[in-house]
Every structure is written in C-alpha cells, then in structure tokens.
Image: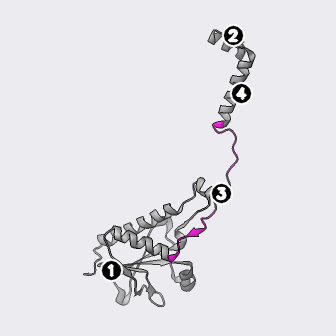
Amino acid sequence: MKSLLERSRSRLGVALPRAAHALILYISLLALMACGGTQLAAAPLGEPSFEFDEARAVEILEESLADLQLEARRGAAIDVGFEEPLNVDLDIVGMRSSIAWISAGDLRRWGDAIPEAAPNNQLRILSGKGESRGEHVLLLRADSYRFFREPEALQRGGVSEPQIETRLRQDLRDFIQFERSRGASAMD
C-alpha cells in the first residue's frame, strides 16, 4: 500500500519535497478549521431589554396612518368592559377604530384587566361595550415590542429597533385592513 506522499508523487508526476507536502497538509488543516471546526456554543440572547416609550410609539403610529392616507386624532375614552373606560391614544377619523398603546404604567394601573399579549404576535382587538358598541380598539402592549440595542446581541441575530418598528407598522396595516373588511366607518 502506497503512502500519501507516494500517491501524490505518482498523480502529479512530480516528486514534491517533503516541505511542500507539510505546507499542503497545514493549509488543509487551516481550511478545515475555518469551515467550522470545533465551536463553542454561544450563550443564549435572553430577553430584549428596550421598548418604545409611548410618545415614540404614537409617533410611529401617526406616521403609519398618514402613509395609509388616514387621519388620526388624540383618542377619547372607550368602554371596553373594564371598571372604567379605557383612554385610547389615537382615534382613526372616519372609522370606528382606535389604538391603545399599553405601557408598563398602564399595566400597573389596569392590572389583570389588560389581556395578555396574543400568541404568535397576533393582534389583540377589544370590542366596545355600551355606548361604545361597534368600536374596535387595537391593543398594543409595549412589552410585546421589545428590542435589543447591544451590538453583540444584534450581531447574533437579536431583534433590532428598526425590525420592531417595521412590525409595529405592519400590525397597524393589518388592523386597518381588518377594519376596512368589516366596513368600519363612522357612517355605520
């Protein structure tokens, strides 16, 4: 049985010096290590630690509504079945639809009355009661829109602020599409 050195000499038709064979072996080992070799498992990312403050969230929502050629005004109180009416952040002009950004302070104030975030980033829509019957309120929990700012977490695939902003805008577009499909206008 021929050695690796003898086989390479016979295939190449040239006798390579031993130093060349050592160099080829060394380069091959470096290439294997660069392709993955043994890697240490990365520590888990943990939970994102930043979220939009209410003013920034409302600003993004107003911009998104303007992009959809819809007008918004500061919201009123809507009866959604809590002990007292919910003060929403934005009412959509011409529709019986509103948006409530639920901050950490709102969660402390309302406690268990605020429903948990819907699974799989589904929208949470509350229906008006009593005089608010026919109204829909898109409930946006700030704790569902968290993101990373730490460079290490972002490099490892953590969700970034622009990604969360894009998701917030998409959630609003989905809500508007749903509301339009049900014919939610001020004329209802």
**Image x and y of residue 6, in percent:** 70, 12
Query: Which of 153/45 is in front?
Result: 153
**Image x and y of residue 96, in percent:** 32, 80
User: Which residue is pictured at 71% across the width and 19% down the height?
Assistant: 21
The Cα atoms of the two marked residues, 3 and 2, are separated by 52 Å
User: Which residue is pictured at 42% across the width and 66% down the height?
Assistant: 169
The Cα atoms of the two marked residues, 4 and 3, are separated by 34 Å
Mark 3 or mark 2: name the one nearer the start of the chain: 2
Magenta stretch: includes residue 9: no
Label 4 residue SS: helix
Q: Quadrant of the N terminus?
A: top right
Q: Amino acid at mark 4?
A: Tyr
Label 3 residue SS: loop
Q: Are marks 4 and 3 in contact (CB under 8 Å)?
A: no
The Cα atoms of the two marked residues, 1 and 3, are separated by 43 Å
Q: Amino acid at mark 1?
A: Arg
Residue under label 4: 26
Mark 4 or mark 1: name the one nearer the start of the chain: 4
Mark 4 or mark 2: name the one nearer the start of the chain: 2
**Image x and y of residue 187, in percent:** 24, 81
Magenta stretch: includes residue 44: yes
Residue under label 2: 15
Residue 175 visible here = no
**Image x and y of residue 144, in percent:** 52, 69
Mark linked to residue 44: 3
The Cα atoms of the two marked residues, 4 and 2, are separated by 19 Å
Q: Amino acid at mark 3?
A: Pro
User: What's the magenta region?
Assistant: 34-54
Mark 1 or mark 3: name the one nearer the start of the chain: 3
